[in-house]
Image (cartoon, rainbow, N blue to C red):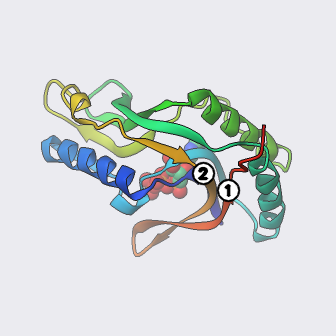
Amino acid sequence: MRLFVGIEFPDNIMRELLRIQKLIRSQAKHGRFVAGDNLHLTLQFLGEVPPAKIGLIEERLHITSQQHNPFLLTLNSTGSFGKGNPLRVVWVGLNGELSKLAYLQNSIAASLAAVGYPPEDKPYQPHVTLGREVELPEPGLQGFNREIEKLPFTVERFSLIKSTVENGKRIYSPVQSFALSVEAV
Ligand code: ATP
Ligand code: MG
């Protein structure tokens, strides 16, 4: 099955992300926008995993979760990958305890590499994808930034998430969630 590790957001953060996505969508000429329920922060993509390996992956992720404390993030500005029009990926960035996020992401990547899922050869850039191939009138994304309420939220867990396509729709279903230990150093 197709798996990735990610962070799911509390309701108020989902609402704010949806509000911004809706604003962008209302001005876009084209774009493939992420379905509302699917907004998330990817930590590590695994791809196709044989069912027999899932237990081992869960074990590694559990151990990793015990070595990290919860931490605080906030929503930040919008941004994009690609500079043309359409923009290849339009996203919302994050702020807050980014070094703790990077530390967690790094540990997860290392623990998965140890069981045969090496990370991609590019630096981790935390972002919440809102849409892909988004064509916007001038001046592009400028103007949406002052709209975002930079709400804080505590990351208390991460999840192993299954990605499927059902009736042509992308569906994410958490396989297991891993609470960050409040006692870790
Ligand atoms: P679709 O592919 O149908 O547009 P999606 O990208 O949301 O939908 P998946 O391709 O299953 O669904 O991806 C699940 C998550 O993993 C998403 O956050 C996606 O950005 C990320 N992801 C997918 N492929 C890769 C990859 N090759 N490298 C890094 N991250 C990836
Ligand atoms: Mg994809």
Disc 1 + disc 2, Cβ < 8 Å: yes
Q: Residues within 10 Å of mark 1 (few under 14, many from 20)?
A: some
Image point 83% across, 59% down: which residue? 59
Instruction: Give the answer, above or below, for where 18 lies relative to 106.
Output: below
Residue 81 relative to residue 7: left or right: left
- Residue 179's tag is 1
- Place of residue 169 in the rendered image (x, y in percent of width and height, measured from the top left): 40, 68
Question: Does residue 123 appear to the left or right of 108 in the view shown?
Answer: left
Report the side of 160 relative to 111 (left or right): left
Q: Is residue 20 above or below residue 176?
A: above
Q: Amino acid at mark 2?
A: Glu
The amino acid on which the numbered mark 1 sits, given as a three-letter code, is: Ala
The circle drawn on residue 156 is 2
Q: Position of residue 115 (x, y in %)?
A: 85, 50
Quarter of the picture containing the C terminus is: top right
The residue under the point 21% across, 50% down is: 22
Residue found 58% across the figure and 66% down from its top: 174
Q: Position of residue 129 (x, y in %)?
A: 41, 44
